[in-house]
Amino acid sequence: MAFWHKTKKKNGWMAIALAQDGVLSAVVQRHAGAKPAVLSAAFHPGERAQSAALLARIGKDLDAAERHCSNVLASGEYQILSVEAPNVPAAEMKTAVGWRLKDMIDFPVADATIDVADIPVASSGTTHNHQVFAVAARNTVIEGVQAAWTEAKVALDAIDIPEMAQRNLSALLEPEGRGLAMLSFDHRGGLLTVTFRGELYLARRMDVTLAQVEGPHDDRQQYYDRITLELQRSLDHFERQFQYVAVAKLVLAPTGSTSLHDYLASNLYLPTDMLDLAAILDLELVPELHDAAQQARLLTVLGGALRDDGGAP
């Protein structure tokens, strides 16, 4: 998934997320037969107005000119919807999907940048219920991202979204021939994804933030109950829609404690594991990522830097 993609480079991907209080960055390099290596992962504090200056400094420090570079949008900067795939040639897919979105997004399609990601159908099934993910962002959002990178004099290869970044992480954890559900939380809310054979099949947002998940003990129960109910509903719907995908387990991204994991493990019908990034990534150069709070903060850019369409040497 990318709003655009340029020429091939070397030395992995650098992913950036522009936040209101600073810039998140990660560099990951893939190696055949080994865990992807995290070369850098950090938060750089600063005001949003300083993003271009921060990006310029980060780009210089991390040798951005020698890497693929992507910008991961924040959850409120785009909309992602599952829609029926139009029966048109691939070259016409984005335009046809745009027409379908005109009554589904909260701004005019004429003001939108649109991209499409396929949801594969069963190899033995028909294509009459073929779905795609449609991603739409206001042109002003995309132009703002482009402007920051242009001002920083760092070449931008792709614009990405958190759902696809989480897909990249989930794909490394999938049991052979089985699907995997992953749940993460940040200051904007929760994100549930289901992947199968490295492809994204389900993406759902939850209106529960990381602060609420890790808030006062007496307040947690209501949020844990809501999370469990939404998980059960989403996974039940997924099983009805994609009967050929057997979800093996739920993996919970780090939140800072084990409280939610313990609750879900006792109340959810699926086996529930806690994500350990060290199991799928080489963290030797960034030992601070063994800390759960750091993993939670940097999870999206780490996933964004796991793109595998040209970043491996």
Image: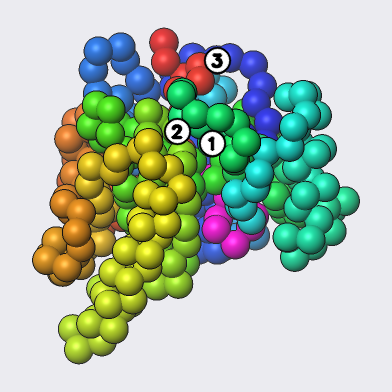
Dot 2 and dot 1 residues touching (CB under 8 Å) = yes
Residue to which mark 2 is pinned: 199
- Give the SS element for disc 3: loop
Where residue 279 appears, x then y in whole percent? 17, 35
* Other-residue count near label 1 (Cα within 10 Å), few / some / many at <14 / 14–19 / ≥20: some
Residue to which mark 1 is pinned: 119
- Give the SS element for disc 2: strand
Give, as a single range, the part of the protein colored magenta.
71-78
- Give the SS element for disc 1: strand
Q: Could you tell whether 6 is left or right of 9 in the image?
A: right
Q: Nearer the viewer, residue 304 or 247?
A: 247
Which quadrant is home to the N terminus? Answer: top right
Of labels 1 and 3, earlier in sequence is 3
* Other-residue count near label 3 (Cα within 10 Å), few / some / many at <14 / 14–19 / ≥20: some
Image depth: mark 2 or mark 3 in front: 2
Q: CA distance from mark 2 to mark 1?
A: 7 Å
Instruction: Please give the label number shown on residue 9.
Output: 3
Dot 2 and dot 3 residues touching (CB under 8 Å) = no
- Residue 45 lies, with reference to residue 89, above or below; the image says below
Give residue 38's quadrant in the image. top left
Image depth: mark 1 or mark 3 in front: 1
Amino acid type assigned to the residue bearing label 1 in the image: Ile
Q: Residue at (76%, 52%) from the top-left corner?
A: 101
Amino acid type assigned to the residue bearing label 3 in the image: Lys
Q: How many marks?
A: 3
Q: Nearer the viewer, residue 34 or 183?
A: 183
Instruction: Name the colouring of the figure.
Output: rainbow
Q: Nearer the viewer, residue 239 or 61?
A: 239
Dot 1 and dot 3 residues touching (CB under 8 Å) = no
